Image (cartoon, grey):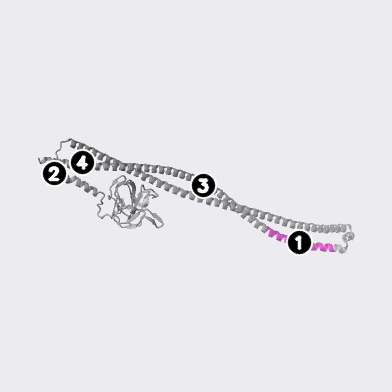
Amino acid sequence: MRKFPVLLSTIVAASTITLSTTSISAQSTDDLNKKIDELQQQQKELEQKRNNLQSDSQQTDKKINKNLDKQDSVEKEINSIDTDLQATLKQISTKETEITKTNQQVEELTTQIEQLKKEIALLKERIKKREALLKDRLRNIQQNGGGMKYIEVILGSKSFGDFISRSSAVNTIMDQDKSIMEQHQADKVAVEKNKIDVENKKTEVEQKKQSLQNQKQDLVALKGQLDNQLSKKETLMASLKDEHEELEAYKVSVEEEQEILARQAEAAEKAKQLAQSEKSELEQLAREREKQQAEQKASPSKPSNSPAANNTPSPNQESGSESGSGSGSNTGSTPAPQNNGGVLNYPISAPITSHYGARWGTMHHGTDFGAPIGTPVRSAASGVVIMTNTEAQAGMSGYGNVILVSHNINGQSYTTLYAHLNSIGVSQGQTVSAGQVIGASGNTGQSTGPHLHFEVHRGGWNGAKSNSIDPMSVLN
């Protein structure tokens, strides 16, 4: 008779446990459904962002191609200008050679002029002497009555032979006078002609020299214009190359962001699959509980007279209550900081050395914790590792060894970043729990000393860090 109350008590207790479990399962299923919906929405948002980035990447490629086309065009213009410039320099060199030759001609003509001046001086001296001689002759002629004296000389001949001799002498004297007059006149004409020829030649050479000087000035002016054009084109080319470098860097950042978004999408898909798997398990458990409950209802039962059985909680009830209150605790050797209402745990037990915000004229997108090399670094929340990057790899080398973890907390996605690590203890795609050691602090990358650089991004991480928030606003 005592077995009946005990059996009834056991059945009531089992029913209570079953109902409690069914209620918890239903509540957990609703939570999981909500979480799955949130993850699906997050996947849609990530897909939209990836599409936007793909469009942005295509536009950047077009800009890069346009930039390269401009560079080719400007390069051709530079080559053309340089060709013209070289031709102009060659012409200037030719003109300078001609000017040098002309200067030599001027010097030669100057020497000739000096020589002619000496010859003219000699001619003038001879002319002066002849003029003196001619003046004497004319004076004698005037004094002696002109040509009558020659007749007297001839008529005074004593014989025919003397007549011939005297006539010949008179003719010789007259021819000499005539020759002197002709030579005198020729010398005068020669002096004037030589003087005019030299002056004309000198004028011609001086004009040629001036013309060459003018041509050279025109060529020098043209060279100045070409130099100016070349300088502008080279400045434009430098600007285009800078723009190209910026576009390439931006393209790399877009590609990095696309890769990170892809990893975040993988993490979201993995989280959704885990949630769906958990949901399936809970639904299966609920069906089994319902089946068990139905079987228990169908079995004959006896009323129990033991009130203690209804009031004493079972061991399973007690353990369920304890596990609920103990979730999310950090078992590290360093006591956890006081909970400030945040959703993330501190990633390291170390003092803060630099806060989020403006610093040294730039934006500091994270919080720095000063810690010796090798200090354990823990995941700030449960999540999926979406990226690990070492100091030797391109892309995020400034961060040194770095880890990015994606989290989904209360329907909000976060990405945490742990930089300048000495070592990395996780791999891409790995699921991590809150407080799990994922690496060790260090001094890699662009670091001024051993520390952990910790960033929090609402949503996904991007190269512009536009989603970054102050970690202190979400840390416990």
Seen in the image, is 328 located left or right of residue 204?
left
Relative side of 357 to 348, left or right: right
Going from the N terminus, do you reach mark 3 or mark 1 first? 3
- At label 2, the amino acid type is Ser
* Whole-number angstrom distance, CA of label 3 to CA of label 2: 99 Å
| CA gap, disc 3 and disc 1 | 75 Å
Question: Real-space Cα distance between discs 4 and 3?
Answer: 81 Å
- x, y percentage for residue 240? 48, 48
Q: Residues within 10 Å of mark 1 (few under 14, many from 20)?
A: some
Q: Amino acid at mark 1?
A: Arg
Stretch of the chain drawn in magenta: 111-139
Checking the image for residue 126, the label placed there is 1
Q: Secondary structure at mark 1?
A: helix
Say which of marks 3 and 2 sits in front.
2
**Secondary element at image label 2:** loop
- Report which residue position mark 4 lands on: 18
- Indicate which disc residue 74 carries: 3
Point out the frontmost of discs 4 and 3. Answer: 4
Q: Secondary structure at mark 4?
A: helix
Please report the residue visible at 13 percent of the width from the left and 44 percent of the height from the top. Answer: 306
Residue wearing tag 2: 306
Of residue 457 and residue 295, the one placed in the foreground of this image is 295
Q: Main secondary structure of the magenta part?
A: helix
- The mark nearer the N terminus, 4 or 3, is 4
Q: Choose between 7 and 429: the one closer to the eye.
A: 7
Q: Viewer-nearest of labels 4 and 1?
A: 4
